[in-house]
Amino acid sequence: MTPNTTISILGCGWLGLPLAQAFIQEDFTVKGSTTSADKLTQLTAAGIIPYLLPLPSPDNITPDTAIFQCDILFIAIPPKVRSGKGDDYLAAMREMLPFIRQQAIAHVVFISSTSVYGNVNGMITEETPASPDTQSGHILVAAEQLFAQETSFTTTIIRFAGLAGPERHPGRFLAAKLNVPGGLLPVNLIHLTDCIGICKAIVQQQAFGHIFNACAPHHPTKKEFYQAAAVSAGLTPPTFTEEPCTGKTISSIQLERLHYRFVVDNWFNWL
């Protein structure tokens, strides 16, 4: 890809905004969407061509589809199941498809989650069948399939593990909680720096049309990691139960084709 390439990012939030800024630093033209009019000035200040794009669109609003005039489209919109917007998510994804086809976008990169694998045991690779056991996991699998079955563009799916980084310090996740189950389960996390690095590597190497797991290669137990993370954040460490158990360990085998090296590859060093 050349700097003349235009990249659009739907959802300039925790991941989408710094990802857009990273592409701008590489001299790409970047368009970005938000559902909040108050955020348009923030996108402009960051060098992003801003678009207000409520999805799904209200009946009385015609969306500005110019954001779909691009070479690569990143979809970085979370389902927001906890805020009660899960039902709107698939409707929003379906609403995008005609615009993507009309603009003949070549590549769609869909940001998903390792939650699509559900609560299974053992080593999980990109070849492991999806088996979601949460509402958000089911919604993401359906959205993945919605884009993957399209033949007018290539779909790349990135399944991120648990997200850590600015405003997401893992020390706060379980601080002061008592008798948290599964203390011996492995941790599957990825830092924002590596989320951005992997997205950039896919674009730079034109590694489109694949499914990538994206998870740091370091998997300490929940007990040792979250207790250390809480101490690092100056918070009360949680306590855990240590009943014998097994859990999934996310492997990012497909990233080997990109020769990607994780920036945060040891969580204790990062803390």
Image (tube, rainbow, N blue to C red):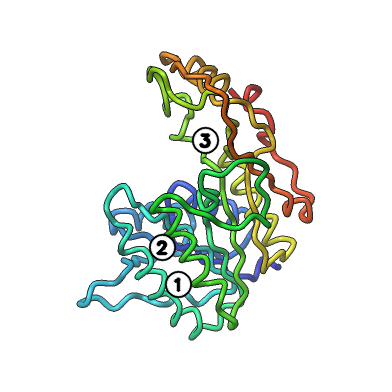
* Residue density around tag 2, few if under 14, some if 14–19, many if 20 or more, within 10 Å: many
Q: Which residue is identified by label 2?
A: 33
Residue located 54% across and 26% down the image: 222
How much space separates mark 1 and mark 2, taking CA atoms? Answer: 8 Å
- Sequence-first tag of 1 and 2: 2
| Count of all numbered marks drawn on residues in the image | 3
How much space separates mark 2 and mark 3, taking CA atoms? Answer: 22 Å
* Residue density around tag 1, few if under 14, some if 14–19, many if 20 or more, within 10 Å: many
- What's the amino acid at mark 1? Ile
Mark 2, mark 3: which one is toward the viewer? 3
Residue 105 percent location from the top left of the image: 56, 78
- Sequence-first tag of 2 and 3: 2
- Sequence-first tag of 1 and 3: 1
Check residue 67 in the rendering and tell me which mark sits there, or answer none: 1
Q: Is residue 18 visible?
A: no
Check residue 264 in the rendering and tell me which mark sits there, or answer none: none
Q: Which residue is identified by label 3?
A: 165
Residues tagged 2 and 3 counted as in contact (Cβ below 8 A)? no
Of 7 and 226, the residue lying toward us: 226
